[in-house]
Amino acid sequence: MTKSLRQRRAFKLFSHVCRMTLGAVFIFSGFVKSVDPWGTALKVNEYLSIYGLECLLPASMVFSIWLCGAELMMGLMLTFKVRIRLISIFAVVSMIFFTLLTFLSATWLPVEDCGCFGDALKLSPWATFFKNLALLPLSVVIWWRYRPDRIFAFSKLEIFLTCLFFSVGMGVGTYCYLHLPLIDFLPYRIGVNIHNEIERSAREKNVEEVVVVCRNRRSGRIKEFDLKDREWQNTKKWEWMDTKIATEDETDAVVVRPMISEFSLRDVEGDATQLVTSMKGRVYMLCVTNFSAIGERCERRMRGIVERAEREGAAVVCLTPEFLPEVTWRSFDGSAAVRCYNIDATVLKTMLRASNGMIVLDDGTIVAKSNCRDIPLNN
């Protein structure tokens, strides 16, 4: 075997490893974002705001589903070697674009988290940049390996697989938008006891500080403030993004984790968090983002929940980010009146990836979640 032949075989093997590696990363990244299109849309909104493209905000959900689906589709096509020449070009272009974008995110227009792996895996801006910097050469190797292939020569099998992968990519995101995420990576997932988590956070002995994460409305710069700092309360200059707790482990390294203790229910009579989360038995929490846009079918479904709670002897409350100027009771399509409490809009969206829906607690533990369209009409 000649030296040149050995080199060609070694390069083919190396390109095969590159293709499988890049395909696996694209599949994982596309899937974990596709199962939570609401979260990806929120990250898209953040980028659009930073770059002064607020006019595109109404299309963020469509772009979220398309972007995540395209990434998942690209990973599947790379893995199964479908139209590899054409896909390798898209892979190189996308890796160049996102490498430049993450470099900007780590330097001039910083963001706290790139969102490249959704809520499944959090990476800092610099870690994301170096990850893309490592993957970029892999895409170039794949393109170089398959550059002699014809770009627009489709076999019947490739056409079928392309349509199949497109349907999978776009279908996962669309399904999770219409219903709920297939996999919940967020703090308020099924099995979490909200009451116990709030108490545990309050008892935490190694708390270093409470950190408020805000974005400068003009420059897009992300900054962390101490809770006692009054500057972040200037809403004309700073936009609230997140609240976190910084703790110190045994190695004195600072660990920042999301606070489930930011869950808070209030009305004009005061804080009702303890009252609701410590209730014994079942509690149905009806979540409504906007009362005027709830829709007749959703009203009827929520009426069924209220009637079901009456039969079971369970409690039912309504959570909404809408302003409640007084003690508010809300009837759903003629149901018995339900007490309404205010909840932060971001917390509500973290708890339930839907505009309207239901969360069920049993002794403070989340046991079920439903998009309003998935609540049975007859309960």
Image (cartoon, rainbow, N blue to C red):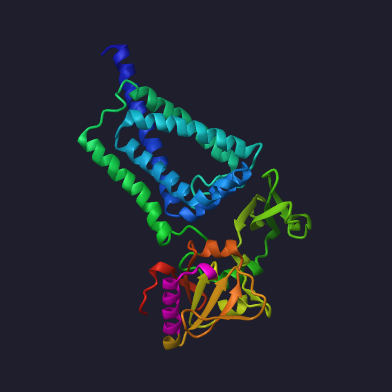
The image quarter containing residue 369 is bottom left
Does residue 28 lie above or below 192 as drawn? above
Q: Looking at the picture, how far across and down is residue 245, in whole percent? A: 65, 58
Does residue 62 lie above or below 245 as drawn? above
Does residue 10 lie above or below 51 as drawn? above
Residue at the spot x=56%, y=33% of the render? 100
In the figure, is residue 198 to the left or right of 6?
Answer: right
Q: Is residue 361 magenta?
A: no
Q: Looking at the picture, how far across and down is residue 349, in whole percent? A: 54, 62
Magenta-tinted stretch: 292-309
Residue at the spot x=25%, y=38% of the render? 159
**Viewer-closest of 269 and 125:** 269
**Viewer-closest of 56 and 245:** 56
Residue at the spot x=68%, y=52% of the render? 214
Does residue 278 show up? Answer: no
Q: Residue furthest left?
A: 156
Q: Quadrant of the C terminus?
A: bottom left
In the figure, is residue 65 to the left or right of 268?
Answer: left
Q: Is residue 307 magenta?
A: yes
Q: Looking at the picture, how far across and down is residue 179, in whole percent? A: 40, 62
Q: Looking at the picture, how far across and down is residue 181, in whole percent? A: 43, 59
Q: Quadrant of the N terminus?
A: top left
**Viewer-closest of 146 and 298:** 298
Does residue 166 show up? Answer: yes
**Viewer-closest of 370 and 12:** 370
In the figure, is residue 323 to the left or right of 280?
Answer: right
Count of numbered tags? 0
- Helix, strand or loop: magenta stretch: helix
Residue at the spot x=54%, y=61% of the render? 350
